[in-house]
Image (spheres, grey):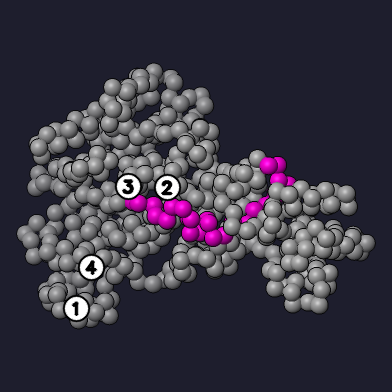
Amino acid sequence: MDRQNLTLLTDFYELTMMQGYFRNENANDTVIFDMFYRTNPQDSGYAIMAGLDQLIQYIKGLSFSNSDILYLRSLKIFDEDFLTYLKTFKFTGSIWAIPEGTVVFPREPLVKVIAPIMQAQLIETAILTIINHQSLIATKASRVCYAARGDGVMEFGLRRAQGPDAGIYGARAAVIGGCIGTSNVLAGQLFDIPVLGTNAHSWVMSFPDELTAFRKYAEIYPDSCLFVVDTYDTLDSGIPHAIQVFDELKEKGIRPAKYGIRIDSGDLAYLSKKARTMLDNAGYTDAIISASNDLDEFLIDSLKVQNAKISSWGVGTNLITSKGWPAFGGVYKLAAIKSQSGDFIPKIKLSENTEKVTNPGNKKIFRIYDEPDHKVKADLICLEDEDYSEDTDIEIFDPNETWKKTLLRKGTFSLREIMIPIFDEGKSVYESPSVMEIRENCVSELSTLWDETRRLVNPHKVYVDLSPKLYDMKISLLNQMK
């Protein structure tokens, strides 16, 4: 699936607009589009950027095949000279983006496209579907892993994902967000991420009795014995039989590197406490107790509060589908058009809803950290020709409630520009790290958030402010439009 030609992965109106631009004398105008979102998913205090690597591969593969041209011709809406143009189409623009695994916030550009308008228009849909989906799942995973408080979380939602692509790239995003591995073998192969798993109830049911099933599994995998114990009766059958097999392995001089039980039903808090007592009394104090069964961040958090004796979590449906918040909500908006003199003319979209009014111009983002804690203080969106220094004071303000101001004294903060070049005039200038390296970057990024921002309910808001120059430009355009 990752090798498919995705050039036609676009909305039909992108192509009709392309033909319109082709017919228009300004067809080759260079423009700037920003991809951003307005509201954090899950009512979270942040989101996680993900999907950039697939976006890069998509851009590299952009070309209309003969079969693409034949199909478009069959629609009887595209002229032959336009179809001839598409035969030699390639992306020649530039793209800036925030790297994967980075903590991000509403209204700031995650991806900035600078390209001829026909090219920028064509890639809109693919950018949105790729970044929206993977950022959604990475954010959900980070919340689940936060609730697990350092315990390992395995993603195993493939069978409940909305199709193979969602399962594959969702697994990738989940690992970026903090999961230690996935049950998805194809994702493991494609992205070189750990594949994990135990056995199913069907294994136990396929043998004459539970004890035999456990014994046979231990014979095949003596160094990794994790038995699912709730097929029949967790406390009276499953756990005693697991302990019996552990005893038999010990008598043979075998001490598995990884062993324990998995509970997939019932009261997980109660059963895990009973299981911990039974395992400890039998001398297996290091045995893993793993849990599954429709888990999400809120249930895991509740189980932690109840002091459940669970140290490993398998999360499927609610993670891979982002249950409760099915869409990321990213949008792609025109921000500027290049004039004949070479300057970018800012563009703004108006709306009855304040949050839908866009930020115009060619922009970049500075992340401001409170020092010495190195926690995110705010993000500052400014124009490309602006610069800020840690050696001078900076005053930031809320662009919606401008009387809310904060003066940052030099020496109390640090700055980092968070957008980086990905394509430069059609050439790829960025090589994605491995998924596990991105995961480590995400762990580091999450450590820059205050605990108040990471809490699951009613998190503290991280402000995304505008520079005075950008704010004045926005107000000027709004006044002109009025």
Residue 467 % position (x, y): 27, 30
Q: Is residue 328 visible?
A: yes
Of mark 3 and mark 4, the one earlier in the sequence is 4
**Mark whose residue sits in front, 2 or 4:** 2
**Mark whose residue sits in front, 1 or 2:** 2
Evaluate if marks 1 and 3 touch, with contact meaning CB atoms under 8 Å apart. Answer: no
Name the secondary structure under disc 3.
strand
Evaluate if marks 1 and 2 touch, with contact meaning CB atoms under 8 Å apart. Answer: no
142 sits to left or right of 350: right
Q: Residue at x 30, y 35 (%)?
A: 381
Evaluate if marks 2 and 4 touch, with contact meaning CB atoms under 8 Å apart. Answer: no
Up/down of 253 relative to 46, above or below: below
The residue that label 2 is drawn on is 41
Q: Residue at x 19, y 51 (%)?
A: 31
Of mark 1 and mark 2, the one earlier in the sequence is 2
Which mark, by number, is residue 12?
4
Question: Could you tell me which quadrant the N terminus lies in?
Answer: bottom left
The residue that label 3 is drawn on is 36
* Span shown in magenta: 306-330
